[in-house]
Amino acid sequence: MKRLETLEALAKSFEGVAKTYAIQAGREVRVVVEHDKIDDIIADKLSHDIATKIEQEMEYPGQIKVTVIREVRKISYAK
């Protein structure tokens, strides 16, 4: 449990990250970013930077998949 919390906190430490979720017993971390602060190019770099920081600061068996999610929703209503 502590490893999951550490993984989430590590990913959350980056600028523009809104939420983090460690899933599959810590084998994957999903990072939801603020769409107005992070564009697609920065999201790609962010996933690499998070993976690098995990490699440097954590001990874990196997590998951890880092997924950055940048979502924009637009809704309109016709009356």
Image (spheres, grey):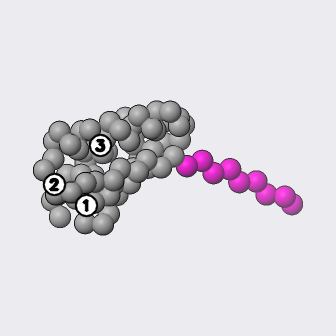
User: What crowding class fits label 1: few (fewer than 14 Cα within 10 Å), some (14-19), or many (20 or more)?
Assistant: many
Tell me where the magenta segment starts and ends, as one range.
71-79
Q: Is residue 24 left or right of residue 6?
A: right
Against 65, is 44 above or below?
above
Checking the image for residue 26, the label placed there is 1
In this rendering, does residue 28 appear at all?
Answer: yes
Q: Main secondary structure of the magenta part?
A: loop
Which residue corresponds to the image point at 76% horizontal and 54% vertical from the top-left? 76
Name the residue tied to disc 2: 60
Disc nearer the start of the sequence (3/1) = 1
Question: Which of the two labelled residues, at mark 2 and mark 3, occupies the earlier sequence position?
Answer: 3
Residue 13 appears at what percent x and percent y? 29, 40
Quarter of the rendering occupied by the N terminus: bottom left
Q: Assess disc 3: are there few (<14), some (14-19) or many (≥20) residues with their C-alpha within 10 Å of its C-alpha.
A: some
Secondary structure under the numbered disc 2 in the rendered image: loop
Q: Position of residue 40 (x, y in %)?
A: 53, 37
Which residue corresponds to the image point at 16% horizontal and 54% vertical from the top-left?
A: 60
Amino acid type, label 2: Tyr
Q: Nearer the viewer, residue 21 or 47?
A: 47
Q: Earlier in the sequence, mark 1 or mark 2?
A: 1
Q: Residue furthest right?
A: 79
Residue bearing the label numbered 3: 51
Is 28 drawn above or below residue 55 in the view shown?
Answer: below
Q: CA distance from mark 3 to mark 1?
A: 13 Å
- Does residue 14 show up? no
Question: At x 25% / y 66%, what residue is drawn?
Answer: 25
Q: Is residue 74 left or right of residue 60?
A: right
